[in-house]
Amino acid sequence: MNLKTTPPTDAKTRFLNKKRSHVTDKTIHNYDATLRQFLDFLDSEGTTDMRDVTSDTIARFEEHRLRSVKPITCRNDMRIVKNFIQFCESIQAVPARLHELIQVTKIKPGDEVCDDFVTREEAVAILDRLSKFDYASTRHVVFLLLWKCGMRISGLRALDVEDFDEGRPAIEIRHRPGTRTPLKRKLDSERDVFITPETAEVVADYIETTRPDVTDDYDRTPLIATTHGRASRTTITKHVYLSTSPCFYNGGTCPFNEDPQECQATSWGHASKCPGSVSPHALRRGYVTAARNAGQPKDVTGDRVNMSGSILDRHYDKGSHDEKAERRKDFLKDI
């Protein structure tokens, strides 16, 4: 079979276009970010034609990535590269079966589990701080709903004002890919999540007093909004990083011996540099753990956050051995 001359950028564009029909925008973003790293590596080696890519090229890329990222990240990168190479085979840009020579990065059994999570005590302290000094602000509502509902960031971002049912009260999470707010598991992620009257009151006050009166590019009324329309994932993430910086909620004391008045990590856009701040997903882990410790059944928790029991156990429930033993205590029978 004669291979066709194919610049790496052309192959990447065709690969992403093919994927767009059946994966979410977030997945496309992840594919694009990884392949940009791969194409930059090819460029650094002077490779301008996919025909010149070999299994050794890809193995050197893996070595290159492992010098700057964790094995779990490299494993995900290599899976995407392997998928990309398989597509390149289909358009005769690389030799057939090249993808079979790619060995995806091996990781230790515990490496794929992230331990970052917000404890109930930390969440209470953060919400107390927000309620007192930033009541019904965008930051307050972002943290409140992520914590109280245990939802993914895509679910929060997808909410419209109309998805808040103050009467029940509840949050209605819906998959709307045609207007750029898809959910991770598509229609399977749709659900209604009950919230307390206290949480509903904060959301209602936010809508009444703080939320910018804007629509998005599809004439929808985003719940989490900026003056430009629907808040981006990046904006939501920045709010969480700032909220979870220890000096934000513990009275201004830095556990890392920095001066909060001078520390760059206390400013918008730089809070992720704080060793103590965490991403939105840490709230999801924290909610699951707190809910299970409070006695909420696993299936109820899983349905509420749209998660299978096995995933919940392996990746999200961060209860200690003592806490898990206490949960089982009331169910023990003397036999």
Image (cartoon, grey):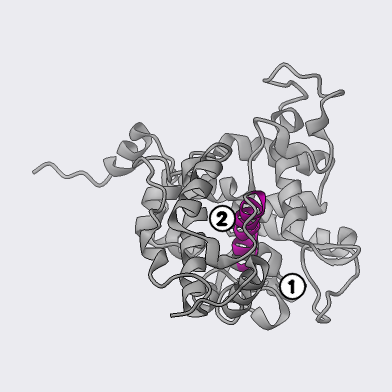
Segment tinted magenta in the rendering:
28-44
The numbered mark, 1 or 2, whose residue comes first in the sequence reads 2
Along the viewing direction, whichever of 146 and 106 lies nearer the viewer: 106
Magenta stretch, main secondary structure class: helix
- What residue is disc 1 on? 160
Q: Residue at x 65, y 30 (%)?
A: 275
- What residue is disc 2 on? 150
Q: Residue at x 71, y 27 (%)?
A: 250
Quadrant of residue 214 in the image?
Answer: bottom right
Q: Residue 41 colored magenta? A: yes
Q: Residue at x 50, y 53 (%)?
A: 57
Given the image, on which type of amino acid does mark 1 rest? Asp
Circle 1 SS class: loop
108 lies above or below 315: above
108 lies above or below 6: above
276 lies above or below 195: above
**Marks 1 and 2, how far apart in space?**
18 Å
Along the viewing direction, whichever of 263 and 105 lies nearer the viewer: 105
Indicate the position of residue 56 as horizontal and vertical percent values: 45, 52
Indicate the position of residue 252 as horizontal and vertical percent values: 78, 24
Q: Residue at x 83, y 81 (%)?
A: 219
Q: In the picture provided, is 166 more to the left or to the right than 149? A: right
Q: Quadrant of the N terminus?
A: bottom left
Q: In the picture provided, is 311 more to the left or to the right than 219? A: left
